[in-house]
Image (spheres, rainbow, N blue to C red):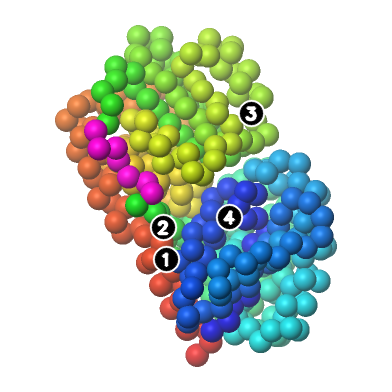
Amino acid sequence: MRVLMSNYEFPPIGGGAGLAHLNLLRQFADNPEITVDVVTSCCGRGLTVERFAENITLYKVGIRKRNLHHWRRSEVLEWLLKAPAHYRRLIKTNQYDLAHAFSAFPTGWLCWRTRANMPYILSLLGSDVPGHNARLTLDYRLLGPLFRRIWESSALVVVNSAGLTQRARVFMPELHYPIIYTGVDATRFHPPAVRADSKTIRLVTASRLVATKRIDVLIEAVGLLKQEGVDVQLTVAGGGRLAEPLKQLVQQRGLNEHVRLLGPVDAEAMPQLYRDSDIFVSSSVREGLSNAMLEAMASGLPIVTARCEGVDELVVDNGLIVEEPHPRCIADAICLVQEQSRYKAMSAAARARVERFTWQQTAEAYLDCYRQVIT
């Protein structure tokens, strides 16, 4: 089968959505059953064509990107203006069985515009589902009717967690939403042979530095623990438009020795960063299904997180979910998880739980979807 994929972001641009797409392509690489062309983006001008594998080609549309991990409306518009010509050219040149869009908008708009040429499926990833992102409230209101047309015209609308399913059903209850979970590479991400014995509780989180991730809550929790005499350090991996305000918060709270804001971290360095840590922490408003949380679990880290969509499927006996995204609640949960007997049990449970979230299973599930659509 031949598939035309589209994703407005792809590493190094973007976050979890791009990484999920990258890992799916790795599973499809050199699979004789499928040939894939991908229309995506890159920094620069013009069109860059890259051979990802013998059966996979990337067509990267150059845009003037200011920040790799944050999309301005002008950048989304620029991609929407440039990408369709390349997308239509590929359709005229090749005979595709179906299209696959990562995110209903802006990417799904390409599929909807060419729906007469071939069926398409959508992978909903979080912010493309109207709901909890306050920054996009106006966008949701203006684009809601278009979202509905894109969704209802698709052959399948796939989500990556039960939590995201609930939000999607609020928007369009009449559709069916099969779940295909994000995977994790449990070979790259694994626990250390022996976790270093340290008096310091080494916390880690990895995310874009945006309001919905509520990194400030984690910093305030560290401040509370410090006041109570707990030896703790938080490492934050990721960049974003809130980098400077968060640095200022760390300074204001006198936490320069207790909070490290690393900025964007190369993907190759992330496995070791998790192995050098003790607990993964999060206070996100929403996650879909967190790539970072899965990677931390594969590395044997217990999870402390505020409740949000997507965490119930990941955190059961391998961490604690606090009901209120409050620094006090996060701080108390960290102390509970750190107790020796509980920590060992949760660490083992974290590693065991990720066995059900593999990229191979994700790829096979998508292949089943493709076959369902074209038969």
Are the residues tagged 2 and 1 within 8 Å (C-beta)?
A: yes
Choose the circle earlier in sequence order: 2 or 1: 2
- Mark 1 belongs to which amino acid? Thr
Q: Position of residue 66 (x, y in %)?
A: 76, 41
- Image point 38% across, 49% down: which residue? 188
Return the x and y of residue 220 as percentages of the image width and height.
49, 20
**Residue 193 forms part of the magenta stretch:** yes
**Looking at the image, residue 307 lies above or below residue 103:** above
Q: Secondary structure at mark 3?
A: helix
What is the CA distance from the residue labelled 4 to the residue labelled 2?
13 Å
Residues at marks 2 and 3, CA–CA distance in whole angstroms: 28 Å
Read off the magenta span: 188-194
What is the quadrant of the N terminus in the image? bottom right
- Quarter of image, res 27: bottom left
The residue closer to the viewer here, 248 or 288, is 248
Looking at the rendered structure, the secondary structure element under dot 1 is helix
Give residue 332's quadrant in the image: top left
In three-dimensional space, the C-alpha distance between marks 4 and 3, rounded to whole angstroms, equals: 21 Å
Do the residues under discs 2 and 3 have CB atoms within 8 angstroms?
A: no
Residue displayed at 52% across by 34% down: 237
Residue at the spot of label 3: 243
**Which of disc 3 and disc 4 is earlier in sequence?**
4
Q: CA distance from mark 1 to mark 4?
A: 15 Å
Question: Which label sits on residue 362?
Answer: 1
Residue lying furthest bottom? 375
Q: Amino acid at mark 3?
A: Ala
Q: Amino acid at mark 4?
A: Gly
In the picture of the structure, the residue carrying the numbered disc 2 is 183
Q: What's the amino acid at mark 2?
A: Gly
Where does label 4 land, which residue? 18
Q: Earlier in the sequence, mark 4 or mark 2?
A: 4
